[in-house]
Image: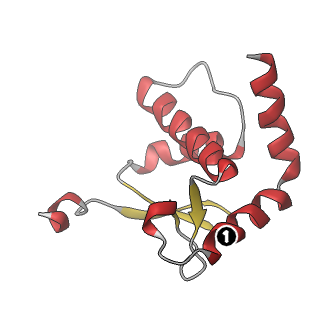
Amino acid sequence: MFKQQNHNLKVVKLTEGILVHTQLKSAYIPALRSGFAGYPVNPRWSGVKFLAWKTGRQWRQALVNGEMVVRSTDSVLVSVDEVPDSKEESYAVQWGYQNSILDNLLKRQKLTV
């Protein structure tokens, strides 16, 4: 049953050095990347593209908060629960510091909301 659920999964490059497994169609991948990169939503997008953008934004926030990490073995973004080794968590924190400009934008967004 597990194999049937993952039948349509494909690997997508979110940003340099970060991959993710998703079922989204190719037309919605740019919106997913846009949300992960911190760009604002495009008001002309369809509902599905908006949800893809929102998912990317949530993944970025989860990465910054330490709820998700980038596995060093295959560079895939996964939940902390899926990583058995505690060394991966420190890698996620280091990655977050390298992107401090985006982190500052996310913090500002929290303050203005």
In this rendering, would 16 be left or right of 43? right
Residue at image location 64% in from the left, 27% down from the top: 41
Q: Position of residue 22 (x, y in %)?
A: 40, 55
In this rendering, would 51 be left or right of 92? left
Residue at image location 55% in from the left, 65% down from the top: 19
Task: Look at the image and name its color scheme.
Answer: secondary structure
Which quadrant: the N terminus? bottom left
Residue type at mark 1 is Gly
99 or 53: nearer the viewer:
99
Instruction: In the displayed orientation, state which residue is furthest to the left.
Output: 1
Q: Where is residue 86 in the image (x, y as percent from the top left)?
A: 59, 74
How many badges with numbers are in the image?
1
**Relative height, residue 103 to residue 39 (above, below):** below
Which quadrant: the C terminus? top right
Query: In the structure shown, which secondary structural element does the residue marked by tag 1 occupy?
Result: loop
Residue at image location 86% in from the left, 40% down from the top: 104
**Which residue is tagged 1?**
17
19 or 93: nearer the viewer:
93
